[in-house]
Image (cartoon, rainbow, N blue to C red):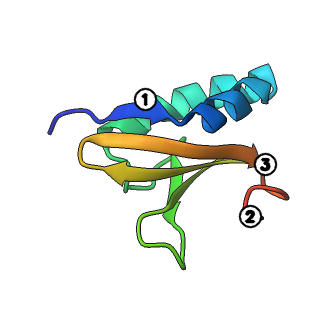
Amino acid sequence: MAAYEIEFTSSAEKAFRRLPQAVRRRFSAAFVLLRQDPRRRRPGCDVRLLSGAANAWRLRVGDYRGIYAIEGSKIVFTRFGHRKDIYRS
């Protein structure tokens, strides 16, 4: 199976750059595992399908979350943020 390509929306890219450097590093390490299979949980890559949305997944890294959708062979991140804020619209 080919590796998935990871993309960011412009707002997600901006939010990602605002995260603390240590958190960005942990997300980058999780992206390596996520590219292999974006639907499977494993150590270092805690993912879950969000309820109430057809194609919304979350990647958990400590107290921070990344929300993404799987579109064909692409993983498109739409939001990054702290767990207390990320699920608010």
Which residue in the protein does label 2 denote?
89
Density class for disc 3 (Cα within 10 Å; few <14, some 14-19, many ≥20) is: few
Is 34 drawn above or below residue 55 in the view shown? above
Q: Considering depth in this image, is 21 or 10 the residue closer to the camera? A: 10
Left or right: 17, with 47 as reference point: right
Query: Counting residues from the N terminus, which is met first, the one under dot 3 or under dot 1?
Result: 1
Compared with residue 81, is residue 86 higher up or lower down, i.e. above or below?
below
- Would you name the residue on which mark 1 appears? 32
Q: Which quadrant of the figure has residue 84?
A: bottom right
Mark 2 against mark 1, which lies toward the viewer?
Answer: 2
What crowding class fits label 1: few (fewer than 14 Cα within 10 Å), some (14-19), or many (20 or more)? Answer: some
**Residue located 42% across and 72% down the image:** 54
Q: Where residue 8 appears, x then y in whole percent?
A: 51, 34
Residue 75 horizontal side relative to residue 25, left or right: left
Q: Earlier in the sequence, mark 2 or mark 1?
A: 1
Residue 74, by quadrant, is top left
Q: Give the mark nearer the N terminus: 2 vs 3.
A: 3
Residue at the (72%, 34%) spot, across then down: 15
Q: Nearer the viewer, residue 85 or 20?
A: 85
Q: Secondary structure at mark 2?
A: loop
Q: Are marks 2 and 1 in contact (CB under 8 Å)?
A: no
Tell me which corner region of the image, top left, top right, bottom left or bottom right, holds residue 10: top right
Q: Amino acid at mark 1?
A: Val
Judging from the image, what secondary structure is the residue with disc 1 in? Answer: helix
Residue occupied by mark 3: 63
